[in-house]
Image: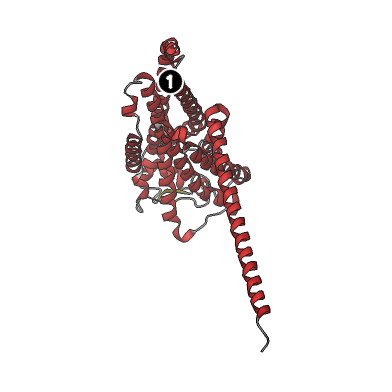
Amino acid sequence: MNTTNISVIYDSTSYLVHSNPLFLVLLYRYGLGFIFLFGFTGNLASMATFMQTTLRATSTAFLFLILAVSDTLFLLVSIFDFIEVGLTQGPILLTTYDSLCRFRWFLKGLTQFCSAWILVFVTIDRWLRTCFPFKANKWCTHKNVIIVTICIIIIGTSLHSHMLSAQLLGRLQPGIATSACGPADPFGLYANFYFAQWPFIQVFFVCLIPVTLMVSGSIDIHRTIQKTKSRIQTVVMNQPQQLRQARLHRQMLILMISSIMIFFVTTLPVSIRLIVAAYEISVGKTTNLIKIISDTGILTILLSLNYAINFYVHCLTSKLFRDEFIQCTKIIYRLAGCTTGNNTININHTIMQSVATGNVQASIRHQQPPT
């Protein structure tokens, strides 16, 4: 695609979208509102649960904890879309809109990249523990998880660094869903890259490679478990510690598989739509911009579910996760009760001291002879 093809899209004002369709406004208002309500609550609950003693001892749970943090950051950045499209139905903070665009688009891309690759390393972690159980304690450590996370952030930042350039990215159609931000110069070379090439790169690194690795790892884990199932049952039959480890491993696998399924269902549709739109632009086909915005807007809501419902799916699929969450809730309830009780005791103690002091002073005044 050359700059001539780009001018076909942007040269005529008939291709510009001046307002969001009503159904998209309602979808962003109530759909994203629902996702935020349950997403922030669920992610905070996931963080608290994965910090419980039983779970936090494993590197897999540590990765899930980091995943919950990344998902929360994605939802926080999406609040701008919720306000612009769903509430005000127009752009906000216009004086700093270009800088805001760069921040939003960069952080959205980075958190999507991080969440995808953290799930990949969750799969690798379980694969190592399944295929190399005697070396897993050496490789699957919290220290290595931190190193891997730092590497993911560095690579993701490098991949999306072009979005931080004031010369390249800025406002495109402020307040319009999925196209509020874009190339600062719609007719420049960067616009060619952004519309025709960047979607392929993004889908490749954020969806296709991660999904391929996760599916391949899951299949190999399943095969390995089937091969060693009878042997493991014989060994651990009368060893309580081994039985607990086997149960923990099984529950971590359930959490991993459920997260992969959520990622696949919510990420693949929008990835396919982005590829189709990029292909149409790259071959110079005249496209209906309103249809593209409507389609990607709907699929973006679906994508946002990936960053909001992990906690609820984990509760449904994993008994261990449910038990740990219930235990966490009880601890928080007891702590809140103790705090309230201590405050009540302190208040009562203060009142009693005041009453006693007042009675003593009154007695002293009563015993003093009149002058």
Residue 259 locus on image (x, y percent): 49, 30
SS label for mark 1: helix
The quarter of the picture where the C terminus appears is bottom right
User: How many labels were placed on the picture?
Assistant: 1
> On the picture, is 107 further left or further right than 36?
left
Residue 155 locus on image (x, y percent): 32, 39
Amino acid type of the residue that numbered disc 1 sits on in the rendered structure:
Gln
Look at the picture and state if 199 lies above or below 340. Answer: above
Question: Mark 1 — residue?
Answer: 242
Identity of the residue furthest to the bottom in this view: 371
> Residue at the location (40% across, 15% down)?
224
Choose between 307 and 18: the one closer to the eye.
307
**Label 1 crowd bin: few (<14), some (14–19), many (20+), radius 10 Å:** some
> Residue at the location (37% across, 37% down)?
197
> On the picture, is 120 further left or further right than 43?
left
Asked whether residue 85 is in view, the answer is no
Q: Quadrant of the rendered structure where residue 140 is?
A: top left
The quarter of the picture where the N terminus appears is top left
Q: Quadrant of the rendered structure where residue 329 is?
A: top right
Choose between 137 and 181: the one closer to the eye.
137
Choose between 39 and 298: the one closer to the eye.
39
Residue 218 locus on image (x, y percent): 43, 21
